[in-house]
């Protein structure tokens, strides 16, 4: 049986990825492990770890997006249309011709089959636990504090 990620943590991952794109322009994570208590995202195209100042800014920007109370919703589009907007190289062939897009307000959109919150106000506070850089991979570990 396929494991279903925590909706709060999974939605936070989307916001983290878009914030990383906006701050560093090096793409979304290529690998993620999403758990209820603590999660991680791995990024390519970096040549170093993040500085303490970058970590603080990243955490602040993610929390600002969460506090923006964006609605989270799904749309569907044909694979050909999605291919003009998104990279399809990681999609399994059996995915089909109609793809699901998750949108977080006007902040983020990406192809996804996971579960999400209905509004970012449900996520809670985002905290970066640690970052590391090893074997040309930047890893960010994070957790969520309870939503108010």
Image (spheres, rainbow, N blue to C red):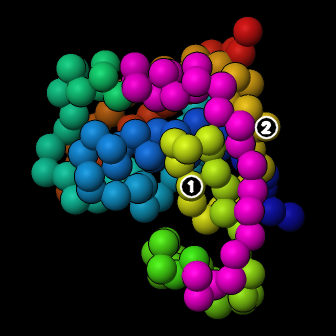
Question: Label 2's element?
Answer: loop
Q: Which residue is located at x 43 percent, y 61 percent?
A: 30
Q: Which of 47 and 22 is in front in this view?
A: 22
Left or right for 73, reference 43: right
Bin the neighbour count of mark 2 within 10 Å (Cα to Cα): few under 14, some 14-19, many 20 and up. some
What percent of the width, then of the height, locates residue 50?
22, 34
Q: Quadrant of the C terminus?
A: top right
Query: Could you tell me residue 90's position as x and y percent?
Result: 52, 77
The single residue placed furthest to the top in the displayed view is 148
Q: Residue at x 48, y 72 (%)?
A: 85
Height in image: 83 above or below 13? Answer: below
Q: Relative to 42, is 84 on the left or the right?
A: right
Name the quarter where the N terminus is drawn. Answer: bottom right
Write down the region rendered in magenta: 59-81
Q: Which of 85 and 142 is in front in this view?
A: 85
Quarter occupied by residue 101: bottom right
7 to 78, vertically: above or below: above
Specify which label sits upstream in the sequence, 2 or 1: 1
Residue 52 lies left or right of residue 118; in this view the side is left
Furthest residue toward right:
1
Write down the residue under mark 2: 118
Taking the image as drawn, is residue 28 in sight?
yes
**How many numbered tags mark residues here?**
2
In the image, residue 34 lies in the stretch drawn in magenta: no
> Label 1: how many residues lie within 10 Å, few (<14), some (14-19) or many (20+)?
many
Residue under the image location 24 percent in, 27 percent down = 54
Instruction: Check the image and report above or below for 117 versus 33.
Output: above
Residue 31 place in picture, x, y as percent: 47, 58
Q: Mark 1 points at which residue?
A: 109
Q: Name the residue rendered at 15%, 44% in the picture.
A: 48
In the structure shown, which secondary structural element does the residue marked by tag 1 occupy? strand
Please check the rendered image and state whether residue 62 is part of the magenta-colored stretch, yes or no: yes
């Amino acid at each position: 049986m396929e494991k279903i990620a925590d909706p709060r943590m999974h939605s936070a991952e989307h916001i983290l990825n878009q914030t990383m794109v906006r701050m560093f322009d090096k793409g979304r994570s290529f690998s993620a492990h999403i758990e209820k208590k603590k999660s991680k995202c791995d990024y390519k195209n970096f040549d170093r770890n993040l500085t303490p100042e970058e970590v603080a800014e990243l955490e602040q920007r993610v929390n600002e997006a969460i506090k923006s109370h964006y609605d989270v919703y799904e749309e569907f589009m044909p694979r050909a249309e999605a291919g003009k907007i998104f990279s399809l190289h990681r999609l399994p062939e059996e995915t089909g011709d109609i793809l699901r897009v998750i949108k977080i307000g006007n902040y983020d959109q990406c192809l996804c089959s996971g579960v999400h919150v209905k509004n970012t106000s449900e996520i809670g506070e985002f905290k970066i636990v640690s970052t590391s850089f090893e074997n040309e991979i930047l890893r960010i570990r994070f957790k969520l504090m309870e939503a108010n």
